[in-house]
Amino acid sequence: MMSVKFRKLALIGIGLIGSSIALAARRQGLAEMIAISTRKSETLEEARALNLGDIYTLDAAEAVRGADLVILCAPVGAYEAIAKAIAPALEPGAILSDVGSVKAHVVKVVGPHVPAGVSFIPGHPIAGTEHSGPSAGFAELFAGRWCILTPQPDVPQAQTEKLAAFWEGMGSDVEIMEAGHHDMVLAITSHIPHLIAYNIVGTADDLETVTKSEVIKFSAGGFRDFTRIAASDPVMWRDVFLTNREAVLEMLGRFLEDLSVLQRAVDSGDGPALESIFTRTRAIRRSIISAGQETAAPDFGRPHEAPPAPAAPLFVREHGGGDDA
Ligand SMILES: NC(=O)C1=CN([C@@H]2O[C@H](COP(=O)(O)OP(=O)(O)OC[C@H]3O[C@@H](n4cnc5c(N)ncnc54)[C@H](O)[C@@H]3O)[C@@H](O)[C@H]2O)C=CC1
Ligand SMILES: O=C(O)C(=O)Cc1ccc(O)cc1
C-alpha cells in the first residue's frame, strides 16, 4: 500500500464526517497540518475545543490557501457557494475532493469553478451514523468501509492514487466509479432506505388508532432500527433528495411497484407468493453476512465483499417484470 502525507489538509465543514477525517488523518500521520473552516463561529469553537486541527478560520478561502488537499465536508446544498468562495485561493497541483452522498450534482455545481491545474476528484465514504456535528466524529469511522472516488476526466492518475492512499491510510478500501452510476447505486442502497425510514416513523406517529405511547412501548427491533435511521440529520438528507432527484425517483418507482406486488399478495391471501419473496430476501441477508459485510451490531472494523447478485428478479410484476421494467 502506497503511503502518503499531505502538507496541508483543508476541511471545509466540520461535522460528523469532517471531524472523523481530522481525527483519523492526524492519528495516521496523513497530513502535516490541518486547517478547519466552518460557516458558524459556534461550530468553529466546538472544533477548536475538541482540538481537531491546527488552523481555525471562518474564511474558507484562507483555509485552502497553500493546501495540497481540500475536502468539502458540508451538506451538498452548500457546495456551490463554497466552491465559488474558495476557487481563487486553490493552488495549482492541489487535489479538491468532497465526501457528499451524491456525486453527479457535485460535478455539475463545483466542476465549473475548479481552476486549471487543480485535480477535482469527488469522493464518498460509505460510512456514517445518524449523529451530526463536530463532537460526533471518531477516528475509526472509515476503517473497513468503502470509499468511492469519481475522478474527473483530465485528472492525472497519480493524483487519484494519492487520494486513494489517503483513504486507505484511514482504513478504507477505495473503488473508482462514474458519478452518475454512483448515484444510482446509492439511491437504492442508502437514499431510498432513509426515505422509507422517515416515512414509516412519520406514519406511526400520525396514527389515531395506535397511540404514541403504544408505539414507543411496543416498538420491536425492526421499528427501532427505522427510528435510528429516521434520526439522521434533516439538512443533510434534505440536500440528498434535492440533488439526487432523478436516481431516487427511478428507484422509488421500482420500489413502489414491488410494494404493490406485496400489497396484492396480502390482500388476496397469497401465502406462496409472500413465502417465496421472504425466502429470497432471507437468502440475500445470509449471503451478505457470510461475505462478512454485516453483523448484528454496528461494527466499524468489518471487511466488505460484494454479496453475490440474485439470479432472477425478486418480484414478478404484472407487466412481466425483468431488469429493465
Ligand atoms: N452523516 C453521514 O452518515 C454521512 C454523510 N456524508 C456526507 O458528508 C457531508 C457532511 O455530512 P455530516 O458530516 O454528516 O454533516 P454534519 O451536519 O455533521 O456537518 C456538516 C458541517 O458542515 C458545515 N456547514 C453546514 N452548512 C454549511 C454551509 N452552508 N457552508 C459551509 N459549511 C457548512 C458545518 O461545519 C457543519 O458542522 C454531507 O455532504 C453528507 O452527504 C457522507 C457519508 C456519511
Ligand atoms: O447510519 C447509517 O446507517 C448510514 O446509512 C450512514 C450513511 C449515511 C449517508 C451516507 O452517504 C453514507 C452512510
Image (tube, helix red, strand yellow):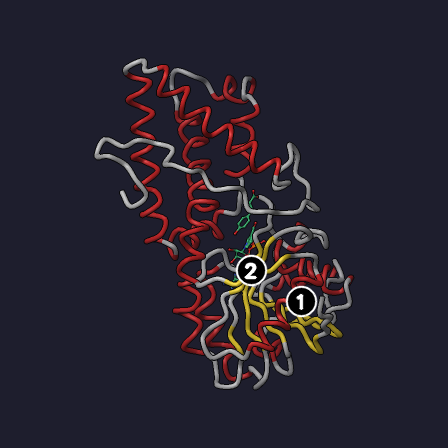
- Tell whether 77 sits left or right of 217: left
Considering depth in this image, is 208 or 317 the residue closer to the camera?
317
Task: Quadrant for the N terminus, please.
Answer: bottom right
Q: Nearer the viewer, mark 2 or mark 1?
A: 2
Residue 61's place in the image compared with 231, above or below, is below
Tell me the crowding category of disc 2: few under 14, some 14 to 19, or many 20 or more residues within 10 angstroms, Cα based. few
Residue sitting at x 57%, y 24%: 221
Q: Secondary structure at mark 2?
A: strand
Residue sitting at x 61%, y 82%: 65
Three-letter code for the amino acid on which mark 1 is drawn: Phe
Q: Position of residue 241 (x, y in %)?
A: 39, 51
Place of residue 253 in the rendered image (x, y in percent of width and height, measured from the top left): 30, 41
Q: Earlier in the sequence, mark 2 or mark 1?
A: 1
Q: Quadrant of residue 167?
A: bottom right
> Which residue is nearer to you in this view: 212 or 169?
169
Which residue is denoted by mark 2 in the rendering?
175
Could you tell me residue 12's position as x and y percent? 58, 67
Q: Is residue 285 above or below residue 24?
A: above
Relative to residue 177, is residue 28 drawn left or right?
Answer: right
> Which residue is under mark 1?
166
